[in-house]
Image (cartoon, rainbow, N blue to C red):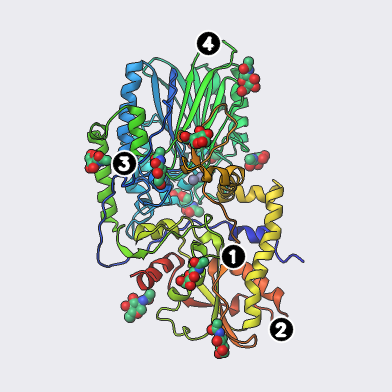
């Protein structure tokens, strides 16, 4: 028997993006971003340059200080935005020497992900300060992402403060904001610009768009127009009418299994042979596809774990031969950057790059991001360790951290309990070493509260977690099998973790054991996309992958089945939990009126409170 419809279970598997806002006031431990302590192996292949070359970032989600932990493969992603700025400057110089064009493009999702964006003090706006550093880079085109639209204040900040700095190159072809003009009249206008036309240094004419997938999870007073409707608009037809030397279609939309073909076909209907370069994003994977021989679409991962490279050797206008393209997924670190710019460590840093690194470190200090809760004894990961196990972050959270953190100053601490949450509540791994405010924000950002129902017989309470997971598993199987209306709805609300996780799982299944056994490969992404040749700049062995359940809970208390206990759960899963509780027993029909607040401690504070007790 099935207890839940998929629509009921989806919000659990999904997770709302909240802005954790609590402030802690404690002693400070400042650690500077270290240059990689581990010697990094450089790439071995030079980049392939064309006439048009593009450096691509997407889904950076606040990782502008790079990945700072020592556990593999984090050092591979240790380059910060200052290093990246220096890289771009040197690459521009190489482009001048080669007398070719080099463009810099971003595909959106600048918000939500690290302390630099989410760790702002009360009254602030997510990513407002961090974005000032991004706008110092010479981006030719940036496109809006769905994470710019969950909270109206963030969209307004992009409209008022960020977009103007890009001078017409911040694109939101199908995304509007409703706000007031200077005379107080209500206006509904694009957040950035709908399109941009510009000429490159080498005189190539470019027509560019910035498209967002059919996103439906946006806040009030923001509007996302369906891609299918956008391509019917008169402004769109006018914008693509004149033939440029190439189309640069940027957008927060995955390069496969989404709506790029609608945009591509609309352009192709008018211009059958004009080169079309597509730079996508959103599903956090490395991917590449060619919609025809005169086009290439690239997607460049997430969290500044990938910098994308796309080059094209343009031929004569009107030619219908295949264009020579190349693409590469770079691991963003100084060694990679120095290799491709032929710089030494001593000559690599530009003044601007150092200025940006310093500014970001100052911001981290201002937000107190290196405040240390404790020292993690080893790595705790979401998918790299079996569940349950000592190395599983989900085991740590459910079996260790919740029972400690939720009973602090709690009058019910002595009453036996079962505590349940959803595994989607954990977003990023914890690594050995200092566990800071920034780490708490990256690992466990959701500011959900905890509720309980008292006097549930232990025998009943213990049945709830397995029943939740069974219902979830049934629905998930359908979810995976059928790209039906319900999956689309979750997808349209911005849910992509399942796609990223499936990508990791495939890497491990395909070649995990053999590649990890090959002693010459380090851990990282192993990309298999649909474009010719090898995409990864450095060959890696994939991370081990283990599936995890949708719901996780504390260990059952050592009491008889009849003992009345507290059934504690995160508010996010209330509907599902009540429905399951009413299915595993028939003595009473439980409703919201039976549910009480358990503690003031929010889910986003659990790991920090635990670390203060257990890791000091
Ligand atoms: C990736 O990181 C590992 C250590 O985690 C290191 O051995 C390797 O050299 C790094 N590779 C690159 C290209 O940075
Ligand atoms: C949307 O914005 C307008 C103009 O600022 C405002 O009058 C209106 O109340 C807003 N709507 C909602 C639902 O907040
Ligand atoms: C977006 O704004 C433009 C300019 O005001 C307006 O013409 C258009 O109808 C709006 N689109 C949507 C989908 O709201
Ligand atoms: C986007 O929305 C349109 C209109 O509702 C729909 O026909 C299309 O299937 C949607 N595409 C995707 C990929 O969600
Ligand atoms: C041209 O590119 C297309 C798409 O990648 C491919 O299917 C086709 O085989 C190529 N043709 C030639 C002559 O290489
Ligand atoms: C690289 O240069 C920085 C200063 O720009 C210096 O602090 C660091 O120690 C150098 N690293 C190596 C490996 O030489
Ligand atoms: C897991 O941790 C517990 C407690 O520290 C320890 O007793 C046990 O041996 C560990 N298990 C494994 C497989 O390492
Ligand atoms: C618990 O109570 C103590 C003493 O009142 C207080 O200092 C501490 O902040 C409280 N902890 C939590 C998590 O509420
Ligand atoms: C690693 O070794 C294998 C087998 O010895 C070889 O095929 C592969 O090319 C090597 N990879 C690298 C990156 O050197
Ligand atoms: C469970 O409780 C019983 C009775 O109090 C006790 O004998 C037993 O050792 C306990 N088991 C564990 C694992 O704590
Ligand atoms: Zn994203
Ligand atoms: Zn996204």
Left or right of 236 on screen, residue 140: left
Query: For mark 1, what is the residue?
Result: 551
Residue 604 against residue 528 in the figure, above or below: below
Quadrant of the image where one finds ligand 10 = bottom right
Residue 151: horizontal and vertical position, in percent? 46, 52
Q: Nearer the viewer, residue 515 or 358?
A: 515
Residue 126 against residue 228 in the figure, above or below: below
Q: Nearer the viewer, residue 233 or 533?
A: 533
Which of disc 3 and disc 2 is earlier in sequence?
3
Query: For mark 2, what is the residue?
Result: 587
3D distance between C-alphas at marks 4 and 1: 56 Å
Q: Badge 4 local density, few (<14 within 10 Å), some, or many (20+)?
A: few
User: Which SS class for mark 1?
Assistant: strand
Q: Does residue 184 appear in this view?
A: no
Which of disc 2 and disc 1 is earlier in sequence?
1
**Residue at the image point whose x is 53% and y is 69% from the top:** 570
Residue 448: horizontal and vertical position, in percent? 48, 66
Q: Nearer the viewer, residue 49 or 479?
A: 49
Q: Kindly check if marks 1 and 2 are in contact, taking CB atoms under 8 A apart as contact.
A: no
3D distance between C-alphas at marks 3 and 1: 38 Å
Q: Badge 3 local density, few (<14 within 10 Å), some, or many (20+)?
A: some
Q: Badge 2 local density, few (<14 within 10 Å), some, or many (20+)?
A: few
Query: For mark 3, what is the residue?
Result: 133
Residue 312 against residue 423 in the figure, above or below: above
User: Which SS class for mark 3?
Assistant: helix
3D distance between C-alphas at marks 3 and 4: 38 Å
Residue 14: horizontal and vertical position, in percent? 57, 56
Query: For mark 4, what is the residue?
Result: 317
Which of disc 1 and disc 4 is earlier in sequence?
4
Q: Kindly check if marks 2 and 3 are in contact, taking CB atoms under 8 A apart as contact.
A: no
Left or right of 612 on screen, residue 303: right
């Amino acid at each position: 028997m099935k207890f839940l419809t998929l629509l009921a279970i989806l919000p659990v598997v999904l997770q709302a993006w909240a802005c954790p806002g609590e402030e802690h006031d404690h002693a400070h431990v400042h650690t500077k971003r270290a240059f990689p302590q581990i010697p990094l192996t450089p790439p071995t292949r030079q980049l392939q340059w064309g006439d048009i070359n593009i450096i691509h970032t997407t889904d950076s989600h606040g990782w502008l200080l790079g990945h700072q932990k020592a556990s593999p493969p984090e050092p591979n992603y240790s380059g910060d935005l200052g290093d990246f700025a220096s890289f771009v400057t040197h690459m521009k110089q190489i482009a001048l020497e080669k007398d070719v064009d080099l463009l810099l493009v971003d595909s959106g999702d600048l918000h939500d992900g690290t302390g630099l964006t989410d760790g702002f003090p009360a009254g602030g706006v997510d990513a407002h300060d961090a974005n000032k550093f991004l706008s110092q880079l010479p981006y030719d085109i940036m496109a809006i992402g769905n994470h710019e639209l969950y909270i109206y204040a963030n969209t307004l900040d992009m409209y008022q403060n960020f977009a103007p700095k890009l001078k017409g190159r911040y694109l939101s072809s199908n995304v509007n904001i409703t706000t007031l003009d200077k005379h107080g009249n209500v206006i509904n206008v694009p957040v950035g610009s709908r399109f941009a036309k510009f000429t490159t240094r080498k005189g190539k004419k470019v027509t560019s768009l910035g498209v967002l997938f059919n996103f439906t999870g946006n806040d009030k007073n923001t509007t996302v127009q369906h891609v299918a409707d956008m391509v019917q608009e008169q402004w769109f037809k006018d914008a693509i009418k004149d033939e440029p030397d190439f189309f640069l279609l940027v957008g927060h939309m995955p390069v496969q299994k989404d709506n790029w073909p609608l945009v591509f076909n609309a352009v192709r209907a008018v211009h059958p042979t004009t080169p079309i370069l597509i730079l996508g994003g959103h599903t956090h994977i490395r991917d590449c596809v060619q919609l025809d021989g005169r086009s290439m679409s690239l997607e460049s991962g997430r969290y500044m774990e990938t910098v994308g490279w796309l080059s094209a050797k343009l031929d004569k206008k009107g030619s219908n031969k295949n264009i020579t393209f190349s693409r590469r997924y770079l691991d963003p670190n100084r060694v990679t950057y120095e290799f491709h710019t032929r710089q030494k460590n001593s000559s690599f840093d530009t003044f601007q790059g150092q200025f940006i690194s310093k500014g970001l470190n100052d911001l981290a200090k201002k937000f107190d991001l290196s405040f240390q809760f404790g020292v993690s004894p080893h790595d705790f990961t979401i998918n790299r360790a079996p569940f349950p196990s000592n190395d599983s972050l989900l085991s740590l959270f459910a079996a260790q951290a919740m029972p400690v953190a939720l009973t602090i100053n709690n009058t019910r601490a002595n009453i036996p309990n079962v505590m349940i949450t959803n595994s989607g509540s954990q977003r990023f791994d914890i690594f050995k070493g200092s566990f800071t405010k920034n780490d708490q924000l990256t690992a466990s950002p959701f500011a959900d509260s905890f509720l309980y129902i008292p006097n549930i017989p232990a025998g009943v309470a213990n049945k709830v977690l397995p029943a939740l997971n069974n219902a979830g598993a049934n629905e998930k199987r359908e979810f995976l099998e059928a790209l039906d209306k319900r999956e689309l709805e979750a997808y349209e609300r911005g849910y992509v973790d399942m796609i990223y996780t499936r990508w990791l799982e495939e890497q491990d299944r395909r070649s995990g054991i053999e590649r990890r056994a090959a002693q010459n490969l380090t851990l990282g992404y192993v990309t298999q996309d649909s474009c010719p040749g090898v995409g990864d700049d450095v060959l890696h062995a994939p991370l081990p992958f283990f599936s995890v359940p949708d719901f996780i809970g504390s260990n059952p208390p050592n009491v008889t089945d009849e003992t009345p206990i507290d059934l504690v759960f995160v508010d996010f899963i209330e509907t599902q939990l009540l429905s399951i509780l009413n299915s595993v027993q028939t003595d009473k029909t439980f409703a919201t009126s039976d549910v009480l607040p358990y503690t003031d401690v929010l889910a986003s504070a659990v790991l920090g409170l635990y670390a203060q007790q257990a890791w000091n």
